[in-house]
Image (spheres, rainbow, N blue to C red):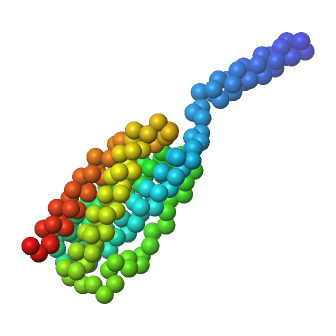
Amino acid sequence: MKHRSRNTVIAAVGALVIATTASAAAAPAPVVLNSSDHSFLSDVLSANQYEIDLSNYAAKKASSAKVRQFAQTIVHDDTQLAADLLKASDGSIPPPASTQQPDRNFEGKTGADIDKAYLDVMVDELDIAAGKFLVAGDGPQHDAAVRAVAKQAAPMVRRHDEMAKSLDDSLTPK
């Protein structure tokens, strides 16, 4: 009887070892970001949060309904983009903090001057972002997950850039 119980325990331990080994082999390896991935994700997450903060302010203070609508679009799309970027980082990069302070570009401005200041900053920010996403989407130095999110985001960022330029041109006196 003792012999049978001992064999049962040994068989159970063996099955547990096999199951644990199979489970460990099936678990995905954690993402280890290289310096290019870390730099790209940190930079674009920070810039993205800056755009969200600017756009939240503009959505409340802009005098033009079109500018307010554009700002709301940026907040919506960039909030989703931030989630995608953070997912690609697999938690290795903390989300940047939001600021509730108005940007220095808005100091002393009201009405249409806020619209113009916001669009000027957004055109500059989105020009830079569009380039970064385009390069990262094709960059072999980046992890596949980082390249995928960059490739997916690049057309949206270019579209936002074109929208900002169009709105900015429409507000500039000719």
Please provide percent x and percent y for residue 163: 20, 59
Please provide percent x and percent y for residue 147: 43, 40
Q: In the drawing, does residue 166 fall left or right of residue 75?
A: left
Q: Residue at x 82, y 18 (%)?
A: 10
Residue 30 sits above or below residue 101 on the image:
above
Between 138 and 80, the residue placed more toward the observer is: 138
Between 96 and 26, the residue placed more toward the observer is: 96
The residue sitting at the front extreme is: 174
Please provide percent x and percent y for residue 9: 81, 20
Quadrant for the N terminus in the image: top right
Residue 91 in sight in this render: no
Q: Residue at x 44, y 39 (%)?
A: 139
Q: Residue at x 52, y 46 (%)?
A: 36
Please provide percent x and percent y for residue 79: 37, 57
Q: Residue at x 31, y 87 (%)?
A: 108
Between 145 and 133, the residue placed more toward the observer is: 133
